[in-house]
Amino acid sequence: MDGLIPPLLNGTAQGALLLLAALGLSLTFGQMGVINMAHGEFLMAGAFIAYLTQQVISSSDLSIPVALPLAFLGAGLLGLLVEVSIIQWMYRRPLDTLLVTVGVSLILQQAALQIFPAQGVPVEKPGWLDGQLTVLGYDWPLRQVFTLVLAALCVAALAAWLKYSSFGRRIRATVQNRDLAETSGVPTRSIDRMTFFVGSGLAGVAGVAASLIGGTNSQMGTQYIIPAFLVVVAGGIGQIKGTIIAAWVVGVAMAFFADWTTGSLAQVFAFVLVVIFLQVRPQGLFTVRTRGLT
Amino acid sequence: MKNLKPWLPLIGIGVFAVLLLAVAPSVLSMHWINNLGKYCCWAIAAVGIGLAWGRGGMLVLGQGVFFGIGAYSMAMHLTLETAGPGNLPIFMILYDPLAALPPFWEPFRSEVFTLLAIVLLPVIVASVLGYALFKSRVKGAYFAILTQALAVALAVLISSTIRETGGDTGLSDFKYFFGYVLSDNGNKLMVYLIAAALLIVCLLVVWQLRRSRFGELLVATRDAEERVRFLGYDPAAIKLVAFVVAAVMASVAGAMFVPIVGIITPQEIGASASILMIAGVALGGRASLFGPALGAMAVGWGQSSLGSSWPSGWIYILGLLFILVTLFLPMGLSSLLGKVARLIWPSRPKPAAASAAPSPALDEVNT
């Protein structure tokens, strides 16, 4: 029983990082139907923004809190640029957004490789993340707790924004019935842009968290994109609660597998597990019921 | 002239065959023959993708899985053949001189088993995977993401099992190919000719499938799956056949890739390799017969020439290619040919180059 707690804590933190990466996708993919393969590169942009912020503000205690909103803004603007220049022409062809954004992701990766050193850049952990929190007799590194808190804050903010703000209401209206929303005076085009901005910005926030846990380099996006998509799909489209549960389960499962085997084999198991789960339940954990033929 | 038209693609395949099998060997140097062989392998996989994606609407983003099955089946056999009967592959001895051959390697000593595995393993894997996915009506982006996840999983699995599969360094240094010495130029030419001939065979198979009743049903399933279901057909079965055929072609491509290139690593079957296969198909025109093959050859050429001489530029070109082709030419360059032909001969109702009619929705965006 004792051996179960460390991987559980570890996995919860992994799941939280996965949730942060998937949260933006659940917005752009879940709500708008855009399959954004460049989401991982938006995450990478957030991590590099954390690094750049540290070059300006040398105190790492201060730079990370400053970097969070900057990363949100930076990655969000990058997303906005991609939306305005490319994706807005493709809303009628959802599958093709996948191909287009694969191109975007290749270009962003290569650009990052040329701007920054190929081996990656170091992002210093702030001093206040050095300690541990004792949970059930085990030391939980504060870095992991920070990821969890950040994920919880982002989820709460996003959920509240979608539910209570007028913007959130318009987004939901646009998703549920675009034509009716438009005739009712909702500017669906600017709603699309705003949704994509927020979704991409969330990837930037995830990038800051990722930079504190793993390396920051041009390839970091590729290791998050597939698990993040799997989490969104397994959780059920358009449902934040499904995404949360799926991210946590995948994170914990990966931590337990990693305990038994190795980290990379754990990833293989987790992927195969999700694929099997989706064979049994293709609509995901939770689903919005419609009468439409799918 | 009227009766000639249905046979035009067949004439095209014939011309292609003459070019690949007769003209190329007599004109090109051995170095380029080898490269062309590599492009042929990618083209074989692309022909299958063209069937599954272009005609069947299934975006198969994880063909690396099947490419890898074929490639590693062949590579394991060639490694064992090089090591000699009863001996261990050299890389295993390097890791552990006392290691025993992993059980799953043992059957690959047999030539017959290897050849059967290259064809039957992808059939089994694709059937099991496809049956469950299509029966539960997984499609579109979901299908694409799931298949890509499997390609990533297989690549990670292979790179993390160094002792059993060679890991990231892959399998290489093959000396023999079914008894023939691989370093010999004549034998290299033979391997190339096999790959080129297989490409022609795959084109013929897809040509026949396209004009068959099955081909019609496949396109119908792509464009209106529900209607096909209401008409009493099982879309899952139709899609499964196309998926399995594509899987076998990818596996055969992987198997020929190994003796031609001389090395197989997890990088050749992972996510980016699978996406590269898609790139060629998208460029050439996914729904046409020749588009996927020619596109894959073009991308393969870019990858091996530009990719080594100007790697950063090549990635930018590849990225732009994805964006521009998807934005402006969703049906690839072959649809451009069709449009040009229509401009020149407006009286012709349906030009031969556009024998693959794009789906109505896509045509709308096109024009």
Image (tube, rainbow, N blue to C red):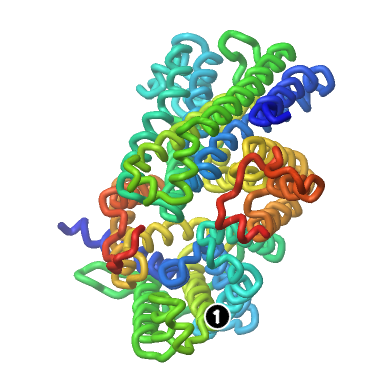
* Observer able to see residue A220: no
* Observer able to see residue B298: yes
The chain that hosts pointer 1 is: A
Q: Is residue B98 above or below residue B338?
A: above
Give the structural element (helix, strand or loop) at label 1. helix
Which residue appears farthest toward the right when viewing the image? B27
Q: Nearer the viewer, residue B295 or A231?
A: B295
Amino acid type at mark 1: Arg
Q: Is residue B2 above or below residue A188?
A: above
Q: Is residue B316 left or right of residue A242?
A: right
Pick the quarter of the image with the N terminus of chain A: bottom left
Indicate the position of residue B318 as horizontal and vertical percent values: 69, 52
Task: Look at 60% across and 14% down and name the residue there.
Answer: B176
Q: Is residue A194 left or right of residue A151?
A: right
Q: Quadrant of residue A70?
A: bottom right
Q: How many marks?
A: 1
Q: Nearer the viewer, residue B54 or B43?
A: B54
Indicate the position of residue B205 as horizontal and vertical percent values: 55, 26
Q: Is residue A158 left or right of residue A208?
A: left
Q: Is residue A251 above or below residue B256?
A: below
Task: Look at 50% across and 40% down and name the residue there.
Answer: B52
Indicate the position of residue A88 as horizontal and vertical percent values: 59, 71
Pick the quarter of the image with the C terminus of chain A: bottom left
Q: Nearer the viewer, residue B261 or A65?
A: B261
For mark 1, what is the residue? Answer: A189
Indicate the position of residue B252 as horizontal and vertical percent values: 53, 26
| Other-residue count near label 1 (Cα within 10 Å), few / some / many at <14 / 14–19 / ≥20 | few
Task: Look at 33% across and 67% down and name the residue there.
Answer: A243
